[in-house]
Image (cartoon, rainbow, N blue to C red):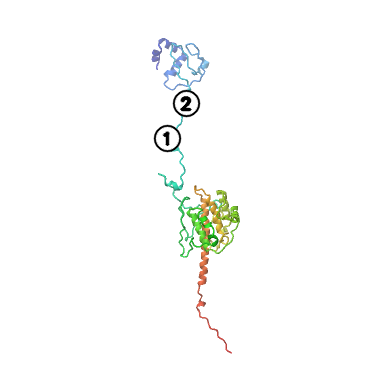
Amino acid sequence: MDHEDYEDFLGQEAYEDHVMNPFDDFLHKAFYANPGPTPEIESNVTVSPSHHVNASMDNRSNASPSGPVHVPSNDVDFSPSAPVEPTLSPSDHPTHALSDDVATLIKPTPALSLSTASSQPGISAPPKEPLVPSSTEASSSVTSMPVSPSTQTTSTTSPTGTATQMDVDGDDDAPDSTMALPTWLRNSKMPDYLRGVSKEKAWQELVTSLFMFEAVNTTTGNLPTTSRPDEVASWIKSKKKDLPPEVDVDPYGSSFMAWWIAIQPRWRLTDNATFVYDVPSDEDWHFLHKGGSAGLYVVVVALSWWIRVLPAEPLPLRAWSAVRDVRWVIDQICMKVSSNSKGTKRARNVITPEATQPSKAKRHRSD
């Protein structure tokens, strides 16, 4: 609004009355003539009941309309009609309500297990990896191991998978896991217990290897007790062998691994606390070649207590690495037993050249 419009709006008398006052002209320019935003003026205005605002030199620099500017009733009130800083009641504040669409996007998604992920529409289960660990410290994990050609298989099951039997591609006379077990094992509840610990293929293969070893082994004895878990000693004294003790997953797992590492041959342990799988040609597995109810059988039973209490997810790689390592050792000893047995049979069936020569008749000197 320019001066002419402002004059027409107020009338000649009122216009002159306001324009003659310099501060009124300042207010006019500030509130009407300036098209920009309302300037922020510090509050220190003294309002008088007269026609004009009492703005001395002291308060002009700090003047702001802290309240409405009062003018006579015959003049137009050109002060801001609303307070400078309006306050909102609690009901006036906006509420951040989520629409149904937005809420769906940020709603937590329940965790999917490996067994149910593939059944969900639009969701594919992660690829199933063989339970082969990477090289880490032996106290918390076991390195991946090569399996002998006669027993090498690849596990592609998850913790919720089904059990399958181990494929054996060895000799025709290789012992089967269903063959007659030793009397002490066959007449107990332990075969059924061990089979029922887990349906995981890796575990079923370990049990099969143990049964094969016990079927052909003739050497019995006790394993070293160095670092052996206390639960094992209590179980040996117990009469209910198929009743597993209650164990805590992590503490017992560490205790079992400490025992398993302590009874290994020295060549299996490296400086970085990992296992070695290159077997020396002269290795006879003297300390671990123990069959019977106090030998490697106890190791498998003790390991079963750890497997029983494992969570289904996330995949407990440390424990399943131990399963594979124990099986690898049993397979190595079993092959050693089979090799020695075949060597003995060959030695018995060897026909020496002397055996083919006819015996010379003894001559008797006649007197």
Residue 209 visible from this viewpoint: yes
Residue at the top extreme of this rendering: 13
Question: Where is residue 238 shown, x and y percent of the image?
Answer: 59, 55
Residue 135 visible from this viewpoint: no
Considering only order in the chain, which callout, 1 or 2, is on the residue closer to the N terminus? 2
Kindly report the distance in space between the C-alpha atoms of the residues bearing marks 2 and 1.
23 Å
Question: Where is residue 226 shown, x and y percent of the image?
Answer: 61, 56
Left or right for 34, reference 361:
left
Under tag 2, what secondary structure?
helix
Give residue 235's quadrant in the image.
Answer: bottom right
Residue 100: image tag? 1
For the N terminus, give its image quadrant. top left
Count of marks overlaid on the render: 2
Q: Image height check: is 342 above or below 226?
A: below
Question: Where is residue 23 shown, x and y percent of the image?
Answer: 47, 15
Crowd class of label 2 (few under 14; some 14 to 19; many from 20; radius 10 Å) = few
Tell me the residue that label 2 is attached to.
Answer: 91
Q: Which residue type carries mark 1?
A: Asp
Q: Image height check: is 68 above or below 178?
A: above
